Image: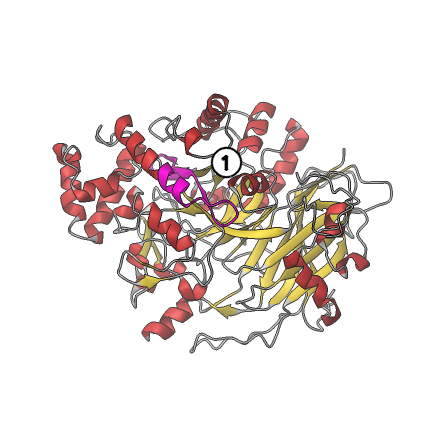
Amino acid sequence: MSFRPTIISAILAIVLAAPSFGQSAEKSSGTKSFRKTDAYSPYAGWNYARQVYWGDTHLHTGWSVDAGAFGATLSPEEAIRFARGEEVVSSTGQPVRLSRPLDFVVVTDHSDGMGTIQEIRAGNPELMKDPTIKRWHDMILKGPTEGTKVAGEMIRMQSTKSLPPAITDPRFAKSIWERNTAIMEKYNEPGRFTAFIGYEWTSNVGGGDNLHRNVVYKDGKDKADQILPMTTFDSENPEDLWKWMSAWEKKTGGSLLAIPHNGNLSNGRMFQLSTFLGNPLTREWAETRARWEPIYEVGQIKGVGETHPLLSPTDEFGGYEIWDKGNLNLVPKKPEMIQFEYARRALMHGLKLEQQLGVNPFKFGLICSTDSHTGLTTAEEDNFFGKHTGVEPGPERWKHPTLKFGDTEVLGWEMAAAGWVGVWAVDNTRAALWDAMKRKEVYGTTGPRMTVRFFGGWDFVAEDAASRDPAEPGYTKGVPMGGDLRAAPKGKAPTFLVAAMRDPLGANLDRFQIIKGWVDAEGVVREKIYDVSWSGNRSINADGNLPAIGSTVDEKNATWTNTIGSSGLVGVWKDPDFDPTLRAFYYGRVLQIPTPRWTAYDAKRFGVSMPEEVPMVTRERAYTSPIWYTPS
């Protein structure tokens, strides 16, 4: 189904998301049921997620060991000011500002040694009494090269629990944490900008199996300060993190959620089909993981983790910004690891586990964030400040080693300028945004702020796509992204209402795809990709493929035009291959037309020439949270 200019008003309504007059029963999206009102204003009584809010749930400042040691000097306060739209000066002395403010941010400095590195740099007298810390201080002052060595040494000592006692002193940790939460309270302005309290729990099992989680607090300082964040000095087992979260909630009455990321660096452990200790999975384990980890960070600077070409060989867009050379503990990547490292296959395995355990432990929504270690949440290709201060803009950063796996290096050009999370919430507050994340009404993009709606139901028809407000039939006749469909009515297949509008400052859209995963009657996991709405006069060919959109990119000058593609896409799609007896999930993927990659902007800006293997063009995209179908 291609885009038609006659329905542009419907596209515009996606952003405005004007409410209905109210005819619906409560849906599993977590929003309240619509209610009729006698008020003249049709906007009185709004009670569903009518607006998308943009933010970053994974941002590090100079308070993180592996940021400060590399030379990051920005504090959490400066990071928030930048996210709010202010211009700041980066750690390398460059003025920087976002094209538009974000709506919220979660500063997630590592709980292990939070704030320590800045105190070491400043020569804190108490810390300087330890000869190892004093040596680190002297090295850091020599510059980022020596600071990088310090970071590596600290990370190794962290994984072996051999850090100097001064760094793990709970009194020191408490003083830093309370300073952190005070900054978040200072800048949290309900309705204008949300500053979440959060941290990253950084499990590096064996010195490098990435099992990291970002912990996000729904509440404020009064509850967050009651218990210090969990560190890997306490445990590297995610199951112990879940126990800590449960105990925290019981004591404080508050609410937490955790967001895993970078399964591609986990040595096949992020979505392994056993417990952390290698024991068989149980229903209780599945319930616990599903409770505490409702969303997964599918894209960020260290690679996009939707799927891998080895797992999805027929997906022409499946090999996007992949980091699969090795792992953080220098273990070479082995093919057998990959199926337990990527989100799509985990979603498929989750369906199979639900058949066995009665609960799906991998029933998560999809988001993107940055994982920037500069204090700067930059995800736009022409405004990308890199993973750490050593790869902030400069003529050499494209070839600067970002990570090393033995003799293998990940070079600067392999960084992905990604990404941000879009949250469909009723307002811009901690509670509303957190609730939306919990119910998975969220999606991720690799940088552009495209507006995306995705609804599933049994009765959507083509006329719903022409509605002034697609959200009204979306909520009244179905469930939004993150929702559930159960027990298909006799003779019916699921229908999906999809709509997307381009970033007002960005590129036109190419296509809206739906990715389906299911477990067949023989217990084998399957996937299929459907093009459901697209721009131009193209048609699906005899091979079942949609012809390419083409490209307007001028690589030499790092420019493109919006003379191809469409500003918006909208449509209704019905699953032609539906079997009501089989579990399945569906999620949306929206592709932009080709645009210059950040490497092309660097080549133009600094007048440098890069080898042919360095990509100059990108296909930015969005990933919605899935909608799940369960037979009963």
**What scheme was used to colour the molecule?**
secondary structure
x, y (%) of residue 619? 53, 64
Quarter of the figure with residue 123 = top left
Q: Is residue 478 left or right of residue 102?
A: right
Question: In front: 265, or 232?
Answer: 232
Q: Quarter of the image containing the N terminus?
A: bottom right
| Residue 373 place in picture, x, y as percent | 35, 50
Residue tagged by mark 1? Answer: 218
Q: Which residues are magenta?
A: 181-209
Residue 187: image location, x then y, percent: 41, 45
- Quadrant hosting residue 90: bottom left
Give the amino acid type for the residue marked by disc 1 in the picture.
Answer: Lys
Disc 1, SS: loop
Specify whether residue 23 is painted magenta: no
Q: Is residue 294 above or below residue 161?
A: below
- Residue 75 showing in the rendered view: yes
Residue 485: x and y in percent read 73, 40
Q: Around disc 1, counting alpha carbons within 10 Å, would you say few (fewer than 14), some (14 to 19), or many (20 or more)?
A: many
Residue lying furthest right = 491
Count of numbered circles in the view: 1
Q: Is residue 182 on the magenta stretch?
A: yes
- In the picture, measured across the screen, residue 426 lies left or right of residue 304, that is right
Determine the residue positioned at 34% across, 41% down.
329
Residue closest to the eye, 421 or 233: 421
Relative vertical location of residue 13 with respect to residue 280 in this rendering, above or below = below
Do we see residue 339 in this rendering? no
Image position of 185 (left or right of 353): left
Residue drawn 64% across the image and 27% down it? 357
Which quarter of the image is occupied by the C terminus?
A: top right
